[in-house]
Amino acid sequence: MTVLPIVTVGHPVLRERAREVSADELASPAIQTFIDDLIDTMRAANGAGLAANQVGEPIRIAVIEVADNPRYPYKPRIPLTVLVNPVVEPVPGPDGTGEMVEINEGCLSVPNLRGNVQRHVHVRVRYLDRHGVAHDEVKRGLTAGTFQHELDHLDGVLFLDRVTDPTTFTTWEQFERFHRDAFVARISDFVARIGS
């Protein structure tokens, strides 16, 4: 197990658009080992996901997993997903609308800060897995939000850029003290309605 150092806001690599990974490169032992290290690093940090440029590698690879995460106990489970060269786009929900939801987000690359972000409730994600197999899936609810957050990283976008009301910024300590209960109640109702 190799836990890589996570770079934080201000590091230029977080503002780069990551480059695509070729099929030959994806099949290489170096990239396969890097994917394992990215997974280990995400798990060690109790992250819901981690993008390659968060560990200093500006390539279009991200990993996502939610399984009894102590940082995000309200998030629905997401099986380990490795995304290579992903593309995400909003899609209408079952009612035909492009519904949005306000999510209070944090980030491993922005330590000790959270803020409210508007995310699409339904998104289509197309990507290759670590074996080069193509996937085309629709994600919804908080799961869709998690995918949007991680894939933003690959375009050099941080959740900070998507916070429209700066008065929602809070440290983790103050979030836990003053805001967590109301957010968890609201988002739990949303999860119950949407289903993920």
Image (cartoon, rainbow, N blue to C red):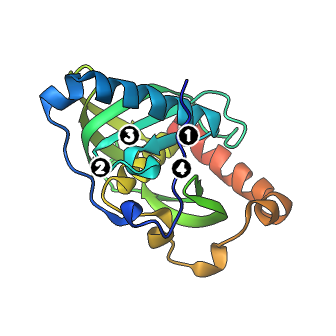
The residue sitting at 52% across, 40% down in the picture is 4
Q: Is residue 138 left or right of residue 188?
A: left
Mark 1, residue position: 48
Q: Mark 4 = which residue?
A: 6
Instruction: Name which residue type carries label 4.
Output: Ile
- Which is in the foreground here, disc 1 or disc 2? 1
Name the amino acid, label 3.
Ala
Q: Give the image location of residue 104, x and y in percent.
A: 61, 59
Q: Residue type at mark 2: give it.
A: Pro
Q: Earlier in the sequence, mark 2 or mark 3?
A: 3
**Is 41 rendered above or below residue 142?**
above
Q: Nearer the viewer, residue 145 or 121?
A: 145
Q: Residue at x 30, y 58 (%)?
A: 155
Q: Residues within 10 Å of mark 3 (few under 14, many from 20)?
A: many
Q: Residues within 10 Å of mark 2 (few under 14, many from 20)?
A: some
Instruction: Give the labeled residue for mark 3.
Output: 62
Residue depicted at x 41% and y 51%: 56
Residue carrying label 2: 92
Question: In terms of image quadrants, where is residue 45?
Answer: top right
Contact? badges 1 and 2 (CB < 8 Å): no
Considering every residue shown, the one lying at the far right of the view is 177
Q: Circles 2 and 4: CB distance less than 8 Å?
A: no
Res 106 quadrant in image: bottom right
- Dot placed on the residue nearer the N-terminal end, 2 or 4: 4
How crowded is the residue under tag 1: few (<14 C-alpha within 10 Å), some, or many (20+)?
A: many
Pinpoint residue 38: horizontal percent, then vertical percent.
Answer: 46, 34
Tell whether 180 sits left or right of 189. right
Q: Nearer the viewer, mark 2 or mark 3?
A: 3
